[in-house]
Structures are given as structure tokens and as C-alpha cells.
């Protein structure tokens, strides 16, 4: 549990923020409740079960940190398809037919560019950069 006043997400517990879930008692959130939120609101919403593992892990992590719509739009940009922020048949098909390694590399670069554009980069950039690098390393094991 943290409540960093510089963090626009506000109170955060297990990575779940008050900004994203204003109706939740963030401080009392349990790990099991957090897992259910992650599964339903991020993994399932981004259709991660239907795309290659390397991309699903990267997409899920980006969605958790920056929102599903933004994460999907950046994935669609990396895929070179219509950008609408929704995971549908076109996005799922592209994820499964376009070379995953190339897409992952672009997706990671675009994510870092986005993070670096944020004002809070000066406070959290080292941690955010390390997180993205760690996620990239994990994803590359699935290529």
C-alpha cells in the first residue's frame, strides 16, 4: 500500500489505484480481490488469452499501468493496423499473423516513448524504465 502525493493514481495497493477504482477501499484491498480485478478488467478486457504470450504479457502490463484503451492503441500502432483502442477480430488476427518479435520490439519502444512524455517521468522514470525492461525480458522468453 502506498499513497504518494506525486502519483496521479492516488492511493495504490497491489497496483490497484484509487483513481481507477474510486469506489474501493484501497487500503483494505486483499490480494485475492486484486487478482480478480486484474483478470476481469485487464487480462479479459484486453483479450490477452487470444494473442501470443509475448504480446499478451506486454499488453497486460501496459494496460495495468496506463489503461486498456491506451495500451491497445499502442499495440495497434505497433501492428500497423487501424487504431481504435478496442481488441476485436482485426487486432487479434494481426497479433497472430504478424511477426511477434517485430511487433513486441515496436510496442516496447512506443510504450517507453509514451512514459517518457509524462511529467512524472522525472520522479518515476527509473522505476518505469526498469519495469518495461523487465517485462521485455520476460516476453522475449516466449518468442
Image: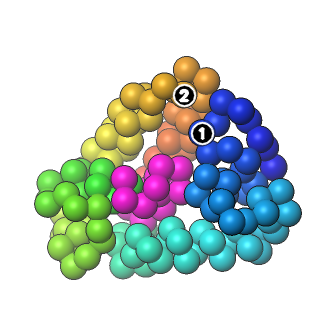
Residue found farthest to the top: 122
| Residue 8 x %, y % | 60, 39
Which stretch appears magenta?
A: 54-70
Q: Quadrant of residue 32?
A: bottom right
Q: Where does label 1 land, which residue?
A: 8
Secondary structure, mark 2, is loop
| Disc assigned to residue 96 | none
- Quadrant containing the C terminus in the rendered view: bottom left
Residue found farthest to the front: 23
| Residue 132 x %, y % | 50, 42
Tell me: residue 71, above or below residue 30. Answer: above
Report the side of 138 relative to 12 (left or right): left
Q: What residue is at 47 percent from the left and 77 percent from the top?
A: 44
Q: As rendered, which of 73 and 131 lies closer to the eye?
A: 73
| Residue 133 x %, y % | 50, 39
Tell me: residue 128, above or below residue 97. Answer: above
Q: CA distance from mark 2 to mark 1?
A: 9 Å
Amino acid at each position: 500500500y502506498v499513497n504518494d502525493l506525486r502519483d496521479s493514481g492516488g492511493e495504490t495497493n497491489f497496483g490497484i489505484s484509487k483513481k481507477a477504482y474510486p469506489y474501493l477501499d484501497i487500503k483494505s484491498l486483499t490480494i485475492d480481490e486484486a487478482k480478480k480485478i486484474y483478470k476481469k478488467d485487464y487480462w479479459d478486457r484486453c483479450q490477452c488469452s487470444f494473442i501470443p504470450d509475448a504480446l499478451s504479457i506486454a499488453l497486460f502490463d501496459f494496460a495495468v499501468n496506463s489503461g486498456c484503451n491506451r495500451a491497445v492503441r499502442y499495440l495497434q500502432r505497433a501492428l500497423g493496423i487501424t487504431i481504435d483502442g478496442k481488441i476485436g477480430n482485426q487486432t487479434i488476427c494481426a497479433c497472430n499473423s504478424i511477426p511477434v518479435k517485430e511487433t513486441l520490439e515496436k510496442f516496447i519502444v512506443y510504450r517507453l516513448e509514451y512514459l517518457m512524455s509524462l511529467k512524472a517521468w522525472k520522479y518515476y522514470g527509473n522505476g518505469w524504465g526498469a519495469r518495461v525492461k523487465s517485462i521485455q525480458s520476460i516476453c522475449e522468453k516466449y518468442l
